[in-house]
Amino acid sequence: MILFKKAEDLYNYIADQQKKGKKAGFVPTMGALHEGHLSLIRQAGLENDLTVCSIFVNPTQFNDPADFDKYPITLEKDIAMLTGAGCHLLFLPSVAEMYPDGIKARMHYDLGFLETRLEGPFRPGHFQGVCMVVHRLLEIVHPDNLYLGQKDFQQCMVITRLTEIMGINDKTTIRICPTLRESDGLAMSSRNMRLSEQERQTAPVIYRTLLYIKNNIQPGDITCLQQKAVADLELSGFRVDYADIADANTLAPVTNWDGRQPLVALVAAFLNEVRLIDNLLLS
Ligand code: AMP
C-alpha cells in the first residue's frame, strides 16, 4: 500500500493510472477502522483496478467539539487492516492539506429538503461539513466508483446530491454497501469503542427496535409503531434524537402507509455521551 500525504501527489498518481485505462474505487473514512469499513474496501477491490482509502477526521462536520476531541484514532492498526484487505493507496492528509484556505472558508451546498430532516436539525452544519470534505476528496481522488455504507443512510443521499451539484454524477458512480453488524445486531461503528461494558450490552436494542418495526408494520396508520420505538428505546436508557419511519427514496416522513411505498426506519439515540445511529429498509 502506498501512503500519500499530499493531495497533488495523489491526484497525479490516480490520473496517470486512469490514463492507462485503470478504474479507481474510493472509500473515504475517518479511521478507527472496523470490518464495516473493510467490507467497502473489499467491494472496491472486486470492482476496480485501484482501491483508494482516505483517513481524515474532518473537523468541519462535528457540530459538537467534544465529539471531535474524543473521536478514536488507531492509525497503526488501520494501516495494517487496510493492507490486509488489499487497499492500494491510502490518503492521510493534514487539516492544512485538506483546507488550504482554512476551515472557515465555506461554500453553501443547497441540499434542500434533505437537510431539514433527521440528522439535519439535530446536527446543525453537519452535512455542510460532510459536503465540504467529500467535495475536496472527490476533486483530489476523482474516482470512477465511490463506496459508501448504508449505515449512514441520509449521508448517502446527501453525497449523491453533492455529486449532482458538482456535476460529476455521470463520471463517479456511487455504490452503497450493506451495514455490517456485530453478532448481536449492533451496527459496527468507530463510536462503539467508546461504550462502557454496560452501554455495550444495551446498544443492540437499537437494532431490535428497528427489527420490531420491520416485522410489525402494516398498511395504515404507522405512528403508533414509531411512538412505541421511542418508548422502548427510552425504557432501555437511551436519550432519543429520533426514531422515524420515512420514504426510502426521499426521506419524507410517512404516517399512513399504503403498503407499497418503500420505507426506511431510522434511529439516532444517545447512551450517555455516545450517539449511535442505525437504519433498516422495511420493504
Ligand atoms: P466513517 O469512518 O464513520 O466516516 O465511515 C466511513 C464509511 O464507512 C462510510 O461510508 C460509512 O457509511 C461506512 N460504514 C461505517 N460503518 C459501517 C458499517 N457498520 N457497515 C458498512 N459500512 C459502514
Image (spheres, helix red, strand yellow):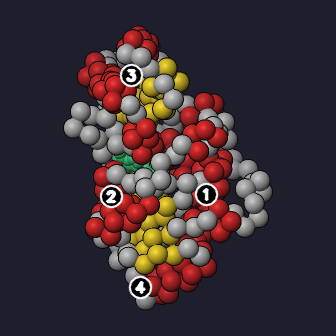
In the image, which is nearer the foreground, mark 1 or mark 3? 1
Q: Secondary structure at mark 2?
A: helix
- Of tags 4 and 1, the one toward the viewer is 1
Circle 1: element type? helix
Circle 4 residues within 10 Å: few <14, some 14–19, many ≥20: few
Nearer the observer, disc 3 or disc 4?
4
180 in relation to 43, above or below: above
**Front residue of this view, candidates 101 and 3:** 3
Cα distance between the residues tagged 3 and 4: 47 Å
Q: Which residue is mark 2?
A: 38
Task: Give the SS element for disc 4.
Answer: loop
Report how far apart the C-alphas of labels 1 and 3 lie in the structure. Answer: 38 Å
- Residue type indicated by callout 4: Gly
Disc 2 or 3, which lies upstream in sequence? Answer: 2
- Above or below, 279 against 68 in this view is above
CA–CA distance in space, label 2 to label 1: 21 Å
Mark 2 and 1 residues: CB-CB less than 8 Å, in contact?
Answer: no
Q: Residue at x 30, y 26 (%)?
A: 201
Name the spot of residue 9 as percent of width and height, x first. 57, 81
Q: Residue at x 43, y 38 (%)?
A: 194
- Across and down, in percent, residue 34 comes to 34, 51
Residue in front for this viewpoint, 117 or 170 = 117
Q: Quadrant of residue 112?
A: top right
Q: Is residue 264 above or below residue 30?
A: above
Q: Quadrant of the N terminus?
A: bottom left
